[in-house]
Amino acid sequence: MVSADVHFLIPGDPATPTGGFLYDRHAIEGLRAAGRLADTIRVDGPYPEGDTATRTTAETALAAVPDGHRVVVDGLAFTALAPAIARHTGRLEIIALIHHPLGDETGLTAAAQDRWIADELDALAHARAILVTSRTTRARLGALGVDTARVTAVVPGVDPAPDLAFRRARPPGPLRLLCVATLIPRKAQHLLLEALTPLTDRNWQLDLVGDARDPVYGDRIRRKVADLGLSDRVTLAGAVSDAVLEDHWRRADAFVFPSLHEGWGIAPVEAVRWGLPVITSDAGALPESVPKPARLMVPAGNVSALRDAIARLLDDPVRRAALADGARNSASALRSWADMRAEFAAVIGGRP
């Protein structure tokens, strides 16, 4: 008989609209469907730093988990909660879920990056096993000295592709560019605005969809839109409902994603699912995640290359159509969330 012996520690509201939390929701559902989920443990906190109150809450929650059970801890919280986790490694099987190393976050000083990497490696010593969301991240952990025999990649998925027949007839008007990403420096919306500024002689509109999880950066983007004279071209939609987001996907003509690091690339893969040509950076796992027939890929952080790729998409309808065909042809072959959920549960359940 299957035992419900797996607990999933999630660092905040499971409904948080980010790719990492979306992955967590599917992982939890996969465990539930397999009859393995014992409990979801929500521990709010100022992550990734954490504080005393956060660690106390985690300690209380972990103390209530029965001996011998397994606890999956999301990587956003794993390092912060390491002191609490360490007290239970003798009686619980701790499994870390790493979306990308904390030290790879954009905007850190060299000293801060070294500190985060060292702290995370120390924390991971308490994990019986490590799950990651891409083969790229598995290799990255290996390069940092983690034994990759302990690391298993379970990559994300997408929902079934919609009927893309509506793409056959495009309404007249500007080419609608879409970027779906939280407003944080790593997503690099500021570079996208800089790349678009010299292209105002073309007919385009840009929708930036995503929560300003970094309020300072969100304010920076709003000021930059105004300062660059793009207020009539760029819409900052903020966080939106699923229904409104679907409308954005349907109205878009192309997807642009200038991120400086990704542990996978859920949003650009979703764009492929919607039959959109994708311009993306080559950061992190993006070369692994975004199908080649659908993409133009540019070096991360290179504004001129990003500008040239957007100009090519705007100016060359034949190339744009070819990439759109590549996206539509790739959409039906994308890995499904159903497959990801089943694999995640099998990997967790199959641990010795």
Image (spheres, helix red, strand yellow):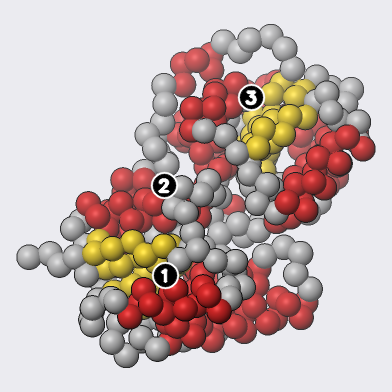
For mark 1, what is the residue? 73
Residue 234 locus on image (x, y percent): 77, 29
Seen in the picture, residue 70 relative to 271 is either above or below; the reply is below
> Residue drawn 42% across and 41% down?
158
Residue 166 has which mark? none
Quarter of the figure that contains the C terminus: bottom left
For mark 2, what is the residue? 157
Q: Quadrant of residue 292?
A: top right
Which residue type carries mark 1?
Val
Answer with left or right where residue 230 lies relative to residue 38. Answer: right
Quarter of the figure that contains the N terminus: bottom left
For mark 3, what is the residue? 253
Which residue type carries mark 3?
Asp
At numbered mark 3, what does the secondary structure look like: helix, strand or loop? loop
Answer with left or right where residue 18 lies relative to residue 213. Answer: left
Dot placed on the residue nearer the N-terminal end, 2 or 1:
1
At numbered mark 2, what does the secondary structure look like: helix, strand or loop? loop
